[in-house]
Image (spheres, grey):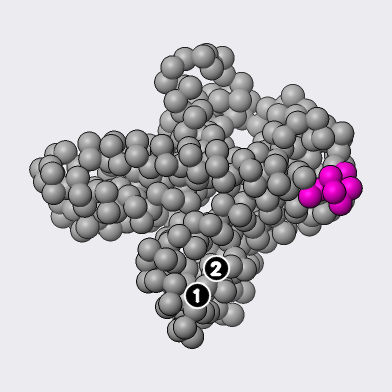
Amino acid sequence: MRGIAIICVFLFHAQEFLFPKFKLGDNTGKTGLLNLLPTAYGWTGVELFLLVSGFVIHLGFLSGNQQFNLSVFYSKRFWRIYPPYLLSLLIFCFTGAGINYYTHSREGLKDLFAHLFLIHNLFDRFYYSINGVYWSLALEMQLYLLYPLLLWLRKKYGINKTTLIIWLIMPVSYGITYFIMSGSKVAQSNFVLNYWGIWALGALLAERYFNNKILFKKHRGVIAFAGFVLIILAGFYVSPALSALISVIAWLAFFEWVLHAQINTKAYTLKILIAIGLCSYSIYLLHEPPLFKMLLWFNILAPKSYLAFVKAIPAFVIIFIVSYLYYKIIELPSIKLGQYFRRKLNLKSAPHSQKSTKTDEA
């Protein structure tokens, strides 16, 4: 699922660069037809990432005999997410505006500190700076901060009512932030509480799966396929906001279909997808600025427009190789370092997660 999500995001960013006149939600003229391409909705891969995150985190909690240790949880999340992020942040500071800008300029210092503390998604001017994908990492970390509250609500009301409560909070949050963050074009609409419901649906799916219950009782594949078609039609004829809502349902149905489908995991193509998913975090961290430069180079070699997405293939292969090395050299050692410090500090998690590093790698 992560492999699918990162491919979607990658293709969307490739389309943005390869077709500079492409504008999401535009349904006028020849360039408007680009919104009928499935790649134009690759941004919904972020919604899929959030569903997967909620699913994996909550399934780990359920599999660990429903024991939640706050220190262990945030230690795992920190060592899983932050060190690889920090290194990539420093790389793009050096290769972007230059480290002098971020250390000697007042605005640069603000930008750097906002990114270091993962609050840059609260400010329009820092939202897409340094690396355009970093906004969702700040969002993810903020969703982790909300997880204990989700567990408290679950204990009090059950997972179904908790999910409903969170979805009811979303429009209220949107209304409040509209006044508090007036003038914001990006940060307000993408505030963490506005995404909490998607993450909660992932947790709901995990609970259903863990208890051998079904969320979509029939026609999961049909619902998913119909949803994907509606994503494109809604985005072209109505608005991307409606596409986002439909995409959550479509990806959720597809996710559950995958969980219960008879899939040959030894198939060669699936092994490739699994490998991509394995280092999807590194791909996500590293792909955007280099992708644009590589596509520019390939565009010079093959300027024909009908070759547009063909140019993305070698770019993806190069980024995948670099990301796989980053996963091996940076991600995995970071996870192991976190395990080492937890042992030193005698931080104990649930018995299930002590026997395996799978929850750390999630």
Q: Which span is picked out in magenta?
A: 341-348
Describe residue 27's horizontal placement relative to residue 317 as left or right.
left
Residue 54 inside the magenta-drawn segment: no
Q: Secondary structure at mark 2?
A: helix
**Badge number at residue 111:** 1
- Residue 150: percent from left, percent from top: 76, 52
Residue 334 in sight from this viewpoint = yes
At label 2, counting other C-alpha atoms closer than 10 Å, the crowd grade (few under 14, some 14-19, many 20 or more) is: many
| Amino acid at circle 1 | Asp
**Do the CB atoms of the residues marked 2 and 1 lie less than 8 Å apart?**
yes
Direction from residue 324 to residue 72 in the image, left or right: right
The residue drawn where x is 47% and y is 33% is 276
Return the residue nearer the eye: 313 or 255: 313
Residue depicted at x 50% and y 61% = 89
Front-most of 93 and 278?
A: 93
Find numbered disc 1 in the image and state the secondary structure of the residue it sits on. helix
* Residue 353 versus residue 248 in the image, above or below: above
- Going by the image, does 117 lie left or right of 356? left
Tell me the residue at 78%/57% (across/down): 149
Work out whether residue 41 or residue 219 is closer to the camera in this orientation and state it.
41
- Kindly identify which numbered label has been placed on residue 115: 2
Mark sitting on residue 50: none
